[in-house]
């Protein structure tokens, strides 16, 4: 196989795995946040929801550029770590223009797309179900695993699908913060489009679309697309 096509396949697999990792991280962060919002009184939940929706009111380019200021070698995060003595000035963390920077920034950008579907599902789960399970002798872990978690699966599925599909197609953020190591398959498509190599760009786009459709089909077979719930 030609070396060029090996690179294309490598970038494709890398993009799928990276998007899956970002989806899992968003789920791990978004689940407790959505649970907190769902259990708070409506007035407090609405106030905190503003913080979740605040990124939508800011330009994607501005948010990405802000992370560059925060994560670069002489940036705010490294400066704070050096100032508190957690790291030395010679051992500043390399969090920009690599895979780490791509993951951090994309998780921040895509996190609301995980929280909102989860919140919409959790908000309508009756608290009496958990109280009834505990009154029957179930532990907190058993109540969560057998009562609460199954009822949140539609929100988990919807959030995971949204985050994954959006992550697969992102190219602006990886281009700005990813460097050579943090590039994704969509950056390759954009490169060929900038060179007016329309046939190759179309072929790579078709490959990406086919991969997403296969994963969509697998999700439908394993979980069921009818169980998705966005609100």
Image (cartoon, helix red, strand yellow):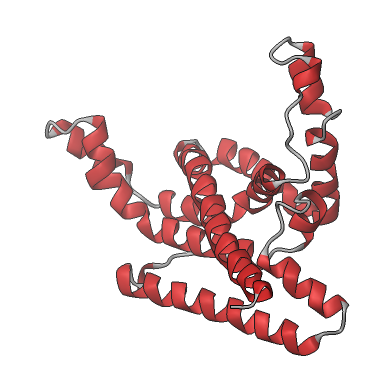
Q: Is residue 64 above or below residue 192?
A: above
Task: Specify the quadrant of the image occupied by residue 14.
Answer: bottom right
* Identity of the residue drawn at 67% across and 86% down: 203
* Identity of the residue drawn at 80% across and 47% down: 63
* Identity of the residue drawn at 79% across and 72% down: 190
Q: Residue furthest top?
A: 85
Q: Is residue 11 above or below residue 54?
A: below
**x and y percent of residue 70 in the render?**
80, 34
Query: For this rendering, which residue is in front, 140 or 37?
Result: 140
**x and y percent of residue 205 in the render?**
66, 80
**x and y percent of residue 24 in the render?**
49, 49
Q: Is residue 165 above or below residue 110?
A: below
| 188 with respect to 166 (left or right) | right
Residue 155 seen by the camera:
yes
Query: For this rendering, which residue is in front, 140 or 73?
Result: 73
* Identity of the residue drawn at 58% across and 35% down: 44
Task: Specify the quadrant of the image occupied by residue 10.
Answer: bottom right
| 169 with respect to 139 (left or right) | right
Residue 225 seen by the camera:
no
Task: Specify the quadrant of the image occupied by residue 200.
Answer: bottom right
Q: Residue furthest bottom?
A: 199
Q: Is residue 145 above or below residue 7?
A: above
**x and y percent of residue 104 in the render?**
67, 43
- The N terminus, quarter of image: bottom right
Total marks shown come to 0
Query: For this rendering, which residue is in front, 206 or 80?
Result: 206
């Amino acid at each position: 196989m030609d070396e060029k096509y090996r690179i294309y396949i490598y970038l494709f697999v890398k993009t799928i795995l990276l998007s899956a990792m970002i989806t899992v991280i968003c789920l791990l962060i978004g689940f407790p946040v959505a649970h907190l919002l769902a259990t708070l009184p409506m007035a407090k939940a609405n106030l905190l929801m503003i913080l979740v929706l605040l990124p939508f009111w800011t330009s994607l380019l501005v948010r990405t550029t802000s992370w560059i200021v925060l994560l670069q070698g002489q940036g705010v995060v490294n400066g704070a770590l050096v100032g508190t003595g957690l790291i030395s000035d010679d051992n500043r963390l390399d969090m920009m223009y690599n895979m780490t920077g791509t993951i951090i920034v994309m998780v921040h950008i895509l996190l609301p797309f995980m929280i909102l579907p989860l919140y919409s599902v959790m908000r309508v789960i009756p608290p009496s179900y958990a109280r009834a399970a505990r009154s029957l002798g179930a532990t907190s872990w058993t109540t969560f695993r057998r009562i609460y978690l199954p009822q949140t699966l539609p929100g988990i599925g919807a959030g995971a699908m949204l985050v994954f599909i959006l992550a697969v197609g992102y190219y602006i953020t990886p281009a700005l913060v990813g460097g050579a190591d943090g590039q994704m398959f969509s950056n390759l498509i954009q490169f060929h489009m900038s060179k007016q190599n329309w046939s190759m760009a179309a072929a790579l786009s078709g490959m990406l679309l086919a991969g997403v459709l296969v994963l969509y089909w697998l999700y439908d077979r394993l979980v069921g697309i009818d169980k998705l719930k966005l609100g």
